[in-house]
Amino acid sequence: MGSILNLMALVVFATSLFTRSIDPVIPQIAHGLNVAPTTAAMLSTGFTLAYALIQPVLGALADMLSKTRLIIACMIVLGIATLACGLATNFEMLMTFRIIAGAAGGGVFPIAFAVVGDRVPVAQRQVAIGRILAAAMSGNLLGATAAGVIGDLIGWRGVFFATGSVCLMVLIVALPALRGMNETPGRFDLSTLMPNYRAIFGNPLAKYCFGAVFVEAIFMFGVFPYMAVLLSTEGETRASIAGLVLAGFAVGGIAYTFVVSRLLTFVGERRLMIAGGIVMAICLVVISLRAPWPVEFVNFILLGFGFYMLHGCIQVYVTELAPSARATATSGHTAFFFLGQAIGPVVYGIGLGSVGIIPVLLCGSAVLMATGLICALRLRRQPAA
């Protein structure tokens, strides 16, 4: 089990560099391509929307064919498309390659969770998922922090060149192990598609799992592309500082993975989900206060910790919605999650242009608190699991 977890963690780490890497350099991209910052922020929507919409297709293909082969193919496309982003001469070209990268990225992270779900017993899965999340958060941490530094030193194009190169180099290192997993390939059979989805959505827990991650993605991740803009209005224009603040979220996620087993023992799933919703709600209120960047950095650490208190519990339930269609289920979870991330910047952008960002943050705070409470009341381990 250890070698498989390490392999999946490496793959997830490399592909998680892309998730928040452009957020610190949104103002630079806007200036370099002569577009408004709110328009440049739509690059996050382009990536995440493509990531979300491709999930039903890639998840079904992974269950039909081979999970590891799909991961290899998607990493190749992701790396090449990201390098092409660095060569874009206008915003439309950059958005096109960003969409391609998002679609390819959709075949790595959720499928890695499905691989773990196939090979790790449910009793140990929370801790195993915690290790994969630690890798994802480490990628987010390095991606956001390094992007800010690279942006200040050589410009926003260097961010795409660096992340694309890392993805392809990690693939070269991981390729022998991925091919050596001896996964038995299936066959392309569309007749299994509808029964798989019926099994997933026939589970009464599916609507709570998918609905919760959709809502939390809108109101929590929606503010991320605008943090550099919000900091700049307070006088902090350095992309490296914006990257550091966003990296605080990853620090909180990593901290969570070190204590998750103890939290489950002493607090329990139900209280963990309630606490996660409350912590996220408080952190959004703090963002609305427009505090100095050191305070925001600490606040984002708490935001990341609170997010995974709730999200980590939900992911375990997702892996058991339909064990015979696990890749389809985890991809469905990711589809709703990234669809929420795609909508989030639009919601916050409308807020900035109309009522202001503070009412949106306060509304999101209330919604996240309610989400944690509803999940705690409705998500229960089924006897069959």
Image (cartoon, grey):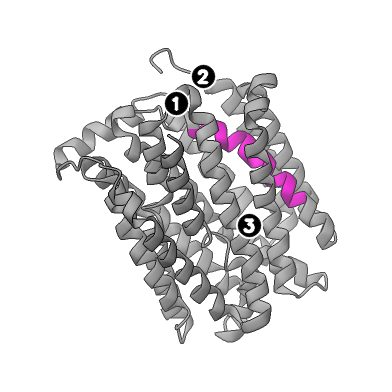
Residue depth check, mark 2 versus mark 3: number of the one nearer the observer? 3
**Magenta stretch mostly in which secondary structure?**
helix
* Marks 1 and 3, how far apart at CA: 32 Å
**Where residue 55 sits in the image (x, y, percent)?**
35, 49
Labels 1, 3: front one: 3
Left or right of 325? Residue 341 is right
Residue located beneath label 3 in the image:
141
Cβ atoms under marks 2 and 1 closer than 8 Å: yes
- The answer to whether residue 238 is seen in the rendering is yes
Residue at image location 82% in from the left, 69% down from the top: 234
Element assignment for label 3: helix
Q: CA distance from mark 2 to mark 3?
A: 32 Å
Give the spatial CA distance, label 2 vs label 1. Answer: 8 Å
Q: Nearer the viewer, residue 358 or 371?
A: 371
| The N terminus sits in image quarter | top left
Give the residue type that dot 3 points to.
Leu
Looking at the image, residue 356 sits to the left or right of residue 16; the answer is: right
On screen, residue 258 versus residue 82, left or right, reads: right
Q: Residues within 10 Å of mark 2 (few under 14, many from 20)?
A: few
Q: Earlier in the sequence, mark 2 or mark 3?
A: 3
Q: Quadrant of residue 186?
A: top left
Q: Which residues are magenta?
A: 299-315
Task: Please tell me how many numbered marks the rendered image carries.
Answer: 3
Above or below, 30 against 3 in this view is below
Provide the residue designation for mark 1: 205
At label 2, which amino acid type do we have?
Arg
Above or below: residue 316 compared with residue 170: above
